[in-house]
Amino acid sequence: MSPLLDIDRLRLVIGRQPVLRDVSLQVPAGSVHGLVGESGAGKTMIAKAVLGIQPGVAEIISGGITFDGRDITHLNDRARRALMGRGISMIPQDPMTALNPVFRIGSQITDVLRLHLGLNRRAAVARAGELLHEVHIRNVERVMRQYPHELSGGMRQRVLIAIAFACRPKLIVADEPSTALDVTVQRQVLALIKELQAHEGTAVLFVTHDLGVVAKVCDTMTVLHSGRVIEEGSVTDCFARPAHAYTRALMAATPRYDRPADALLPVPQAVTDDLLSATAAWDEQHATA
Amino acid sequence: MSGVFLARRLLLAIPTLLGVVLIVFVLMRVVPGDPIAMMTGLNATPADIERLRALHGFDQSIFTQFVFYLENILQGDFGTSITRRQPVADLVLSRLPATLELSVAAMIFAIIIGVFLATAATLWRGRVAERMADGFSALGLAIPDFLWGLIFILVLGVMLPILPISGRIDPRLGFEGKSGLYLVESFFTGQFAAFLSVAEHMILPAAALALPLAAIIARVLKSSLGDAMRQDYVLLARVKGFSRARIVTRDALRNALVPTVTLTAVQFTFLVGGTVLVERIFGYPGLGNMAIEAVVNRDLPLIQGIVITFAVIFIALNIAIDMTYALLDPRLRHG
Amino acid sequence: MADVTSMVSRAGWRRVMKPGGRILFGGGILGLLLIAAIFAPLLAPHDPLEQDLMVSYLPPFWSAETDGLYPLGTDSLGRDILSRLLYGARVALTVAVVAALLAGLLGTLLGLLAGYFGGWVDTVISRAVDIWMAFPPVLLSIVLVALIGTGLHAVIFAIVIIDWTRFCRVVRAEVMVQREQDYVASAVTVGLSRWRTLFVEILPNVAPLLLVLFSLEMGIAVIVEAILSFVGLSVSSDMPTWGGLIQEGRLYVHQAWWLMVLPMACIILTVLGLNALGDGLREKLDPVMRR
């Protein structure tokens, strides 16, 4: 069966600078796919490209993105807007700034329900209440009438998750959704995402730099460095038998509760140098005139 | 919330008001020239002058006069106009509605024009619309209200005489406005000919008053909209699938209005102050027009009354703006 | 220690010196104004007060019936408009510069005191500002001049009295920001007295901002003078003023529209230029100030 999301040799540049170098990635329907890498590796750019919100200066010069059998690489504005929020949605990174401070919580959920599902006010409000219930928010009535600044970070993130799942999309792009939260809340949020995803059968593209998160939540994964895919496969396989030195280094660098802090190792210079020269070689080989 | 907030602001306004009255009072008393002498004819004897002086209380010490004056004000007595021989309070009240109608109409114009320009410039960023909006703002900022008034008189009153340039209503219509608020009253009593006439007469002076404010609103709002469009919640709105038009006019605008109100607040009070000249230029029978007459004629009690009235309007306006600010930004309501 | 502080202010000044479009435009207008004002007696083709009823209502140079001797036409009494405009520029510029300077001095001083010393000084000054701002400026200026009497001094006095609050508020806010900066703390540690800190350390850093306010204030002064002379309350009626010319021209707007339009254009251009200058300076200085 063909994957729900199929990124095929995507090449993206900003000006003359390559950012994504022939990235290929598949997310089967209903599964959680982790996209790992250090900052600047290009993971967010991939997420944005899937959503169609990459910066104007970023240009996709070859390769494509297929979603549910449809080429969504270069959609026109109208088609894009019909897809976003409905077929594909997003869980943003920073819950403190992602919600609109001047509108109540309720309206920030009902708006997307009414836009894509055409529900009338009543039905939308009822459905929004259900959604808040599903993300384990108590006092649903009260929260619907509140403003974002009245909620804690963890609660805001739950609201954002509710918004993401609102129209029952087939794919959710989660861009480091727990990074801005403290550890205990992080765990709850991740568990929540996993729970909802399993229940609804939603596929998730999980962008993160934290391998620990990947281990907990993801089924399959892709490791990215300088816009190139270094390794991919099922999470179990990659963790048990990492094929690439970089992957191994990343795992070694991940803090674990059963290992003292001073045993953490940064990625060895040799590995980084290796990767950088490989990247340079790629650039030369694929130089656009 | 609102009740307490309002009460607090009103309470704080009192010392300011007191200060205003005091300053006005002192200024008037420091005048070179004798207003009493102006009132009397050439045949007045010194005895008459003394009597008149005592009548108006000018023979007491300044402090006593002030206390006297305050007492009277609190009973609604603002003295009697020297030139018109009527109670100042009555005179002020007779002209106040006209000025209020004009000011409110101008403010509404200004907000509509300003918001429209800023929104258009943001929606069609980079295109002609933006340039035009910017150009208009620059022009609007440089040309004060009375010059706009003169320009309008020239262009729309003389060159292309399509609008009246003086008065408040066509006197031939025989309209009798009981409330003083001609526009409102004529509308609600169904006298549409009168309504149209009043509206016609108000357009030019209101526009003259509105344009400088509109220019500032346009400029500040455009900048705030720009800031708002860069926020994460706008990104989320895009990802939800909303069109740019809706995002600008709903999600961003609502947020951008908040800083705009603070930054443009003072201009609203300038608008009211502008009625002084603009009414004069257009022969519009309002408070401002009467003010200039009073000043030229050195009618102290009347000047006092009018200045205090304006100050009260200003203070009330400031409070209204503060409340609007709290209304717009929910984060302020609970602090 | 002193080096660091003077470095900060010097960096501000260097930035200012690089001209941008708006600064050039505004500076150009100001320059023209200066030339017109200073050299009016040399540039004016006629005596601005000289009347000659034989040549009244002559149109400006673009019209067919013009007389070459009167490039911008004449008014109802046969007086040359160009000369009157040039002399009007004198009044405008004098008022603009002097009023802006004095208002700036007063407002800046009070703003410095309020912002730096805080406490009751701040409360008193801020209250005064609040009360002042409760008055409609136009009305107040008219009232003041009507009371004090007409004349250049009166007009300048009125403007200063009314608009010092503009400087005061902005300077106060800026001083309060600067007060928290490191260089102030180090100045205090070194043992500089509070007064010296205020004037020697903080003031130079506030100075670029003052330049912006000054050019904007000049624009406002020009407008207020125009308003006052329009209402007939400015300098004595002998001296031509732009506002006075507008008022005179208004009466003949049907026959000779240029009588009103030309002085209006002068005012508009001047204010546009001064605003542009202020804006351009503000833009240049903003990133520097916020550092």
Image (cartoon, coloured by chain):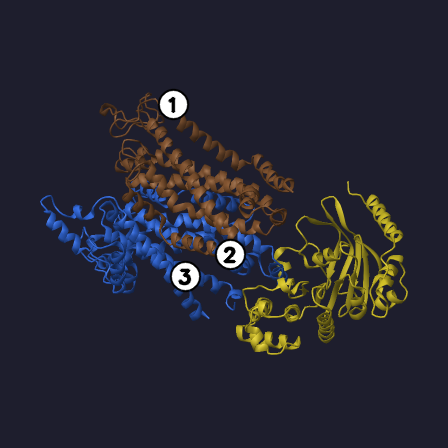
Chain colours: A yellow, B blue, C brown
Task: Say whether marks 3 and 2 touch (CB < 8 Å).
Answer: no
Residue topped by disc 2: B259
Residue A197 vs residue B65: left or right?
A: right
Q: Which mark is residue B319?
A: 3
Residue C34 vertical placement versus A233 (above, below): above
CA separation in Å, label 3 and label 1: 52 Å
Q: Quadrant of the C terminus of chain A?
A: top right
Q: Chain of mark 1?
A: C
Please tell me whether mark 3 or mark 1 is closer to you in this view. Answer: 3
Residue B126 vs residue C220: left or right?
A: right
Residue C277 vertical placement versus B116 (above, below): above
In percent of the image, x 44 and y 61: which residue is there? Answer: B322
Element under label 2?
Answer: helix
CA separation in Å, label 1 and label 2: 48 Å
Q: Quadrant of the N terminus of chain A?
A: bottom right
Q: Position of residue A279 (x, y in %)?
A: 83, 49
Q: Amino acid at mark 1?
A: Leu
Task: Say whether marks 1 and 2 touch (CB < 8 Å).
Answer: no
Q: Amino acid at mark 2?
A: Pro
Q: Nearer the viewer, residue A139 or A86?
A: A139
Residue topped by disc 1: C43
